[in-house]
Amino acid sequence: MHSVAILCLLPLAVLAGPAFLPRPRLDGRIVGGFEVDVRHVPYQVSLQTSGHFCGGSIVSHNFVFTAAHCTDGQDASHLKVRVGSNEHGAGGDFFKVKKVHQHPLFNYQTVDYDFSLLELEESITFNSVRYPVRLPEKDDDVYDGALLLVSGWGNTQNSQESNKHLRATVVPKYNDEQCNKAYTQYGGITKTMICAGFEEGGKDACQGDSGGPLTHGDVLVGVVSWGFGCAQPKYPGVYSRVSSVREWVHEVVGF
């Protein structure tokens, strides 16, 4: 299994064209956030093997959306998702994964097309703590400054804030051009990526659990993917842009 630890200060790696630093992976954390009840984010799930390692979002009775860098090299039979719980370590119910549908264009080095759909062995019965998130239409965009919600169980970087309970925070959508410029040394961003965070960083900026949801209202606009550090000034979190792969999602899920 590939690690999702931050890889910030590694030697130069040769990607297509010029040499860029490797994309720094997020290590899954909500910084400067608040505890949230799963009833407010009923689509949130915990992706697990022997324990929690990534987040995900319910999109239908039988499918969960997550990041390809969470599933790359994984055997579906070893994966399960916990749904309907405020804690990643207790409560709710487990659902086994029947098949991993990883985007065929996913590139681990560039983190492009960082999408996976998990097909479950059994159907999820919806209720107040387990309910699907809506998907955007093809090429739907989010305006700069729009307030987006990210949630997960990652490290909070604060001994006073436990990651045992589900946490969330609100971040504004970051301008694509400015985000691309910020990450020039890492090869910039692509059309399958969307950025969110505060220019000044700090307690209000965040990156949530890898594979977890970034939502605008009740619509899944992004999947937690990569970024430099956590809550760093001028380095917003980079998410996989769901609207860029709606045709692929339709092929896999059927809508």
Image (tube, rainbow, N blue to C red):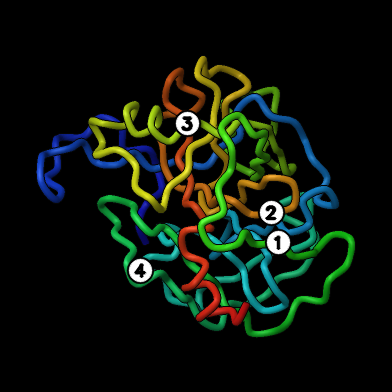
Measured in 3D between alpha carbons, the distance from the residue under mark 2 to the one under mark 4, in whole angstroms, is: 29 Å
- Can the viewer see residue 53 in this picture? no
Residue 230 vs residue 170, the one in the foreground: 170
Give coordinates of residue 149: x percent, y percent: 68, 40
Q: Position of residue 112 (x, y in %)?
A: 34, 54
Quadrant of image for the C terminus = bottom right
Instruction: Look at mark 3 in the image and give the residue it sits on.
Output: 175
| Residue type at the position of mark 3 | Asn
Please name which of the two marks, 3 or 4, marks the residue nearer to the observer: 3
| Crowdedness near tag 4: few (<14), some (14–19) or many (≥20) residues, C-alpha within 10 Å | few
Q: Which residue is mark 4?
A: 73
Q: Quadrant of residue 45?
A: bottom right
How packed mark 1 is, by other alpha carbons closer than 10 Å (few <14, some 14-19, many 20 or more), is some
Compute the Cα span from label 3 to label 1: 23 Å
Residue type beneath disc 4: Gly
Looking at the rendered structure, the kind of residue marked 1 is Arg
Mark 1 and mark 2 residues within 8 Å of each other at the beta carbon: yes
In the picture, the disc for residue 134 is: 1
| Disc number for residue 178 | none
Question: What residue sits 74% from the left and 42% below the top?
Answer: 165
The answer to whether residue 235 is above or below residue 227 is above
Mark 2, other Cα within 10 Å: few <14 / some 14–19 / many ≥20:
some
Circles 3, 4 touching at the beta carbon (< 8 Å): no
Q: In the image, which is nearer the foreground, mark 2 or mark 3? A: 3
Which residue does the numbered mark 2 point to in the structure image?
A: 219
